[in-house]
Amino acid sequence: MSMQATARPLEERMTNMSLPTIHMAAPMPGFPAHQRFVLVRLNDEGLLYAFTSIDNPELRFLVVPPEKFFDNYTPEIPDEALALLGYPQAEDLLTMLVITAGRDATSANLMAPIVINQVNRMAVQVVLTGSGLPVRAILQRGK
Amino acid sequence: MLVLTRKAGESVMIGDDIVITVLEARGDVIRLGIDAPRDVRVHREEVYRELQAANREAASPTDEAVAALTEMLRPPPQH
């Protein structure tokens, strides 16, 4: 098993310009100026990614694929979000949860996942209003 | 703040293409209908504020926090 990838700093990997640019179809709440991001894998097993702003690489979010941590997380994406994403096929959608890495606890935002259309690389942070899903769900070592 | 009085069934226009209609007023609960272009995102304010706060808290974690998380996600040792 290769451990090299995790040892390399993020900035070094940011120079890899082959990473596809992801465009926010609507800005993330709180970050209106950031329209373009890249998704950088930080973990060999694909458990952890950085969602890093191209407009300002100092802004990054940690994101995780929900299926590795939360069973039965299959949010219904509202029509408005599907319209913003260009009406993708379900299999072309990639869902990522935004992580808040605290010193004592780490949480995942289940209420507002980042959903990416992998075909046109448009993304939106979908707000699952009325879902009752938590903004801060405790993240634990997954399956 | 601009203050307007509207009855149920009446609307307010914001710009050229956003229409907010009062559908029903019952006591202190008002139901609104909102017609807006699809690139205008409409949220309940408290939901949007909470999400804004959560995003700001999540943004740009320290290297220590990233290291701790990476450690937590490390596969358990194989025997």
Image (cartoon, helix red, strand yellow):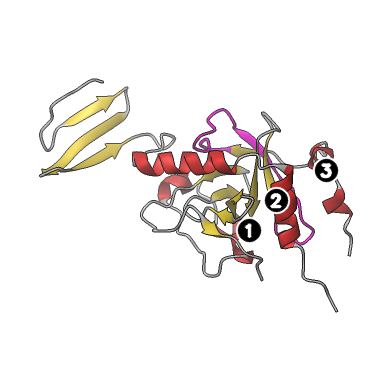
Q: Which of marks 2 and 3 is nearer the N terminus?
A: 3
* Kind of residue at badge 1: Pro
Magenta stretch: give its range.
A24-48
Q: What chain letter is assigned to the residue under label 1?
A: A
Badge number at residue A9: 3
Q: Residue B47 location in percent, x, y?
A: 39, 44
Label 2 element class: strand
Q: Which of marks 1 and 3 is nearer the N terminus?
A: 3
Residue B64 visible in the shown view: yes
Q: Dots 1 and 3: beta carbons under 8 Å?
A: no
Q: Residue at x 56, y 66 (%)?
A: A70
| Separation (CA) of disc 2 from disc 3 | 13 Å
The residue where tag 2 is placed is: A49
Q: Which residue is drawn at 48% across and 40% down?
A: B53
Query: Which mark is in front, 1 or 3?
Result: 3
Q: In this view, does A124 lie above or below A5?
A: above
**Residue found at the very far top of the displayed protein:** B2
The residue where tag 1 is placed is: A65
Q: Residue A96 location in percent, x, y?
A: 60, 53
**Residue found at the very far front of the displayed protein:** A104
Q: Which residue is drawn at 59% across and 42% down?
A: A122
* Kind of residue at badge 2: Tyr
Position of the C terminus of chain B by quadrant: bottom right
Q: What chain letter is assigned to the residue under label 3?
A: A
* Kind of residue at badge 3: Pro
Q: Is residue A64 left or right of residue A137?
A: right
